[in-house]
Image (cartoon, rainbow, N blue to C red):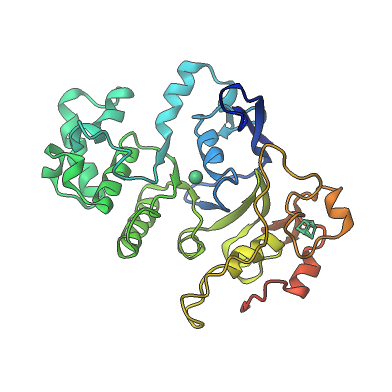
């Protein structure tokens, strides 16, 4: 039941009244060893805030974040710091997330220093090992981030995230800033590392083609809530929430021509300062009935490892309001 609200100034600039942003509003999910859960949704739906809260980079307003059974939100600071080595993040902007004034070797070794993990004399060896793990030559350690391409910088970011031997990594749009040809290489690297090291990934993304390659399970977020969560294949062959269906209908179909990238949900995303009552999607949903503006739907089982929060999900599958062509 994770909730993250924060205060912000309204559009009245300096003297605007303080407003509460409902960034994340009561979500639940669990991740197993070796599993990738993807979080998808439009920008501003709370994906990154969820990722940051999962790492305690953002304090939850309420709810729990448990790692191996322990609630991180109530851990004393020192224990939380010690726990942090198991929880890491890879960022969207591979170049900007590295300090331009530090060598690559320093960037990768920094977590070892912070967590006091290897004797000084062994740190250089560990850096070499990590560079090899992500497919970079050992001499990269003495160079600076600007000497590397975006894809190479993302490999450095991954090596840095792996330095303290984490078990859980939040990947926040790790390939969306990269060329398509490079994306595939980084995704393959992440997949190989997961198998090799037994990692759990929370994979934040908006590109459903990429998510289809990377995830075991997928959670779809809309305005701070999970509206559908399912095993990947179940979701990709039978999305049941009208919003999920809308997202899939916006994916270009190669057979029809790559320019069929129509965004099909009409209307603006409502503000997370004042989310609609009832179902938050009702202002844009082609399936909406009167009850939708009043009764918030909760997640319910609609199959094995498939849950959806919609009063009329079965009708939406029948009606197929966005004209999806799905097999299976
Ligand atoms: Fe649409 Fe109603 Fe389902 Fe919400 S509950 S997605 S408004 S049909
Ligand atoms: Mg984001």
Residue plotted at (48% across, 75% down): 259
Q: Quadrant of residue 8?
A: top right
Give above or below for 227 relative to 96: below
Q: Quadrant of residue 97?
A: top left
Q: Quadrant of the N terminus?
A: top right
Q: Is residue 304 visible?
A: no
Residue plotted at (35% across, 45% down): 93
In the image, taking residue 24 as reference, residue 47 lies left or right, namely left
Q: Position of residue 318 (x, y in %)?
A: 77, 74
Residue plotted at (13% across, 40% down): 143
Residue plotted at (46% across, 16% down): 78
Q: Quadrant of the C terminus?
A: bottom right
In the image, taking residue 206 as reference, residue 291 lies left or right, namely right
Q: Position of residue 13 (x, y in %)?
A: 57, 28
Q: Which of 259 and 117 lies nearest the eye of the viewer?
A: 259
Give above or below for 253 relative to 78: below
Q: Is residue 62 visible?
A: yes
Q: Which of 153 and 277 lies nearest the eye of the viewer?
A: 277
Q: Position of residue 39 (x, y in %)?
A: 55, 51
Give above or below for 153 relative to 126: below
Give above or below for 51 relative to 207: above
Farthest residue to the bottom: give it: 255
In the image, taking residue 146 as reference, residue 191 lies left or right, namely right
Farthest residue to the right: give it: 290
Count all numbered tags in the image, as a single digit.
Answer: 0
Q: Position of residue 202 (x, y in %)?
A: 50, 47
């Amino acid at each position: 039941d994770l909730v993250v609200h924060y205060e912000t100034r309204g559009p009245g600039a300096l003297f605007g009244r303080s407003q509460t942003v409902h960034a994340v509003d009561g979500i639940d999910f669990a991740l197993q060893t070796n599993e990738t859960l993807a979080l998808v949704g439009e920008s501003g739906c709370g994906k990154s805030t969820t990722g940051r809260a999962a790492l305690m980079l953002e304090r939850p307003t309420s709810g729990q974040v448990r790692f191996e059974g322990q609630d991180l939100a109530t851990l004393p600071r020192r224990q939380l710091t010690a726990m942090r080595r198991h929880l890491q993040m890879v960022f969207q902007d591979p170049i900007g997330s590295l300090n331009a004034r530090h060598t690559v070797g320093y960037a990768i070794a920094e977590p070892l220093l912070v967590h006091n993990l290897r004797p000084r004399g062994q740190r250089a060896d560990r850096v070499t090992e990590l560079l090899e793990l992500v497919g970079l030559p050992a001499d990269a350690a003495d160079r600076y981030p600007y000497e590397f391409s975006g894809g190479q910088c993302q490999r450095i970011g991954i090596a840095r995230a792996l330095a303290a031997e984490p078990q859980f990594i939040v990947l926040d749009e790790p390939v969306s800033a990269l060329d398509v040809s490079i994306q595939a290489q980084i995704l393959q690297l992440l997949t190989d590392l997961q198998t090799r090291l037994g990692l759990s990934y929370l994979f934040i993304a908006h590109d459903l083609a990429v998510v289809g390659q990377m995830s075991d399970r997928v959670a779809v977020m809309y305005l701070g809530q999970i509206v559908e969560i399912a095993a990947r294949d179940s979701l990709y062959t039978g999305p049941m929430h009208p919003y999920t269906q809308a997202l899939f209908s916006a994916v270009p179909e190669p057979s029809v021509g790559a320019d069929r990238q129509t965004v099909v949900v009409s209307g603006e995303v409502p503000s997370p300062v004042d989310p609609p009552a009832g179902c938050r999607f009702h202002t844009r949903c082609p399936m909406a009935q009167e009850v939708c503006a009043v009764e918030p739907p909760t997640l319910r089982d609609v199959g094995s490892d498939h849950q959806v929060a919609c009063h009329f999900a079965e009708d939406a599958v029948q009606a197929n309001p966005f004209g999806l062509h799905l097999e299976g």
